[in-house]
Amino acid sequence: MGYAIDSLKQNADFSFLAVYAGAIFLIAVIQGIFRFYMRRTIIGVSRWIEFDLRNDFFAHLERFSANFFLNNKTGDLMSRATNDLNAVRMVLGPGIMYSITTVTMFIFALALMLSINVRLTIYAMLPFPLLAFFISRFGIMIYKRFEKIQEQFSNMSAYLQENLAGIRVVKAYVREDNEIEEFRKQNKRYFEKSKSLIRVRSFFLPVIELMGGLGILVVLWYGGYQVILGEISIGDFVALNAYLLLLLWPVIALGWVVSLFQRGSASMGRMNKIFDLEPDIKDDENVLKIENIEGEIEFRDLTFSYNNTNEPVLKNVKLKITKGMTLAVVGPTGSGKTTLVNLIPRIFDAPEDTIFIDGISIKKIPLKTLRENIGYVPQDTFLFSDTIKENVVFGVTDYSNDDIIKSAEISQVLKDIEDFPEKFETMLGERGINLSGGQKQRLSIARAIIKEPRILIIDDALSSVDTYTEEEILKRLKKFMAERTSIIVSHRISTVKDADWIIVLDNGMIVEQGTHKTLVDKDGMYANLYKKQLLVEELEQD
């Protein structure tokens, strides 16, 4: 542009102008090609990094024990895996791309400006140190405000997730209006925190534009004066203005980039708080190379409390379960039954050398081996939003249709499945909402059975099943459990009376143990529970 304007003073013909116009057009085309490939490369790479980072984050979450999820809200973790991750991706994509553009454009434009006129270039750059100060100050403010926004977004996400998960309770207690009002308050807090960031950014970007505008003002005033004096040509003056205008967009983009980096830094900090945590339950360094277990379980002076609280949930538990034995655990609510069975597959971690399988401390058995050899039906039945078939085969990779049918038959859920139009391909709603409580429990039992585990744990998973169906399930399970170590937790005496050995827990301690007959004859806690249940059955028959 400078050469073209200067050539006009020298009475240049159209051919000269055509050459300069062609050069400008060629540069624009080359610039467009390189910008296309730059965007495709850098933005593409940022998407791949986002893909890997999300996979890594999810894989890291999967390594944590149940204790971690008791102390961290699901909505908060979802917010980090989505909203925070997107902020990080914006840094890795547009943030890096515009940083490269800004730095490259600034270096080349400044060098060319200096080659035209050093003094005028220095005057034009005078506002930039002040710009650096503003960027530094505003960057800190953006970081702090965005961190608070993300925290509030996590709180709001957690509230929404929890409310939707418990929607039936909300409706049953007619609390819709209260929940709507509480969510409105959560949303209002998020709105106000977002406004605080908007106020900073709405002041930040105009300040940056003002600094760039001051540079242009200096060039127009001082550069114009030099043109009048004849110290620089009109072409050089136009070129300097053009270079300064080229710098104006990178300077404005710099403000946006700083905002991106601060927001991304705050979000990556939140994600790193999870990445930096080590799973509390994992394989020890001295873990043994064991691929299978036989199934003998022994508790040696087991005392356990959650989160190292002073009050233990289990106290001095001593018990040996031989291979192939069926053990029943009964006791009042809160006596520690579920805690006891949760410690076997290391859902929670027991103290060192208190639980042994086949004479080996469970902490020396690889977690994968331990859990692959245990079929666990938890008290809180959980089904995935998938087909019935996929829920049954969830824990296995090698199976046949006969295996699926056999496990469903043993758990007495096969007839229910065949009544569905799609049978095993029937899609379940969230948490299996389109099934009854008894159907969910029986499907969970089928999921444990198809693994053919060496140890089978059923934690009060027949509570929603009628007495007749319960008897049929137990009759079929007896054959299945013949060569396996089985532990059945229940409140019903009818469920446990045929077990090889029965223990009664109360206040975390084994207060009674023996066979059904010996415990009834003892006339203790077990016998009282048995008499009460017999009385209830008689009243129901009347």
Image: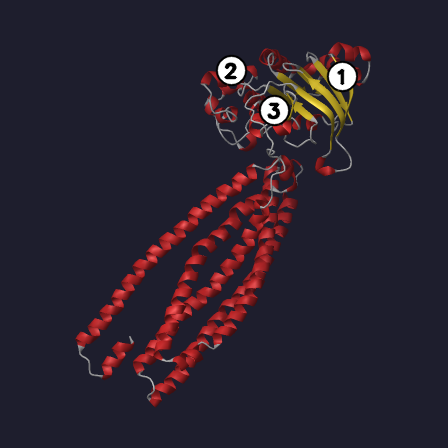
Say which mark, if any, is on residue 377.
Answer: 3
Residue highlighted by disc 1 = 513
Up-down: is 449 above or below 200? above
Q: At numbered mark 1, what does the secondary structure look like: helix, strand or loop?
A: strand
Q: Going 58% across and 61% down the picture, which residue do you hit?
A: 196
The residue lying at 49 percent from left, 45 percent from top is 53
Q: Is residue 467 above or below residue 392?
A: above
Helix, strand or loop under label 2 = helix
Mark 2 vs 1, N-terminal side: 2
Using the numbered discs, state the Cα–Cα distance from disc 3 to disc 1 in whole angstroms.
Answer: 23 Å
- The CA distance from mark 2 to mark 1 is 34 Å
Choose mark 3 or mark 1, whichever is in front: 1
Task: Using the image as rendered, state which of residue 260 and residue 295 is in the foreground.
Answer: 295
Residue 498 picture quarter: top right
What residue is at 73 percent from the left and 14 percent from the top?
537
Mark 3 is on which residue type? Val
Kindly report which numbered mark, 2 or 1, lies closer to the viewer in this rendering. 1
Where disc 3 sits, the SS reads strand
Which residue carries the number 2 mark? 406
The answer to whether residue 151 is left or right of residue 390 is: right
Vertical position of residue 366 compared to residue 411: above or below: below
- Mark 2, Cα crowd under 10 Å, few <14 / some 14-19 / many 20+, is some
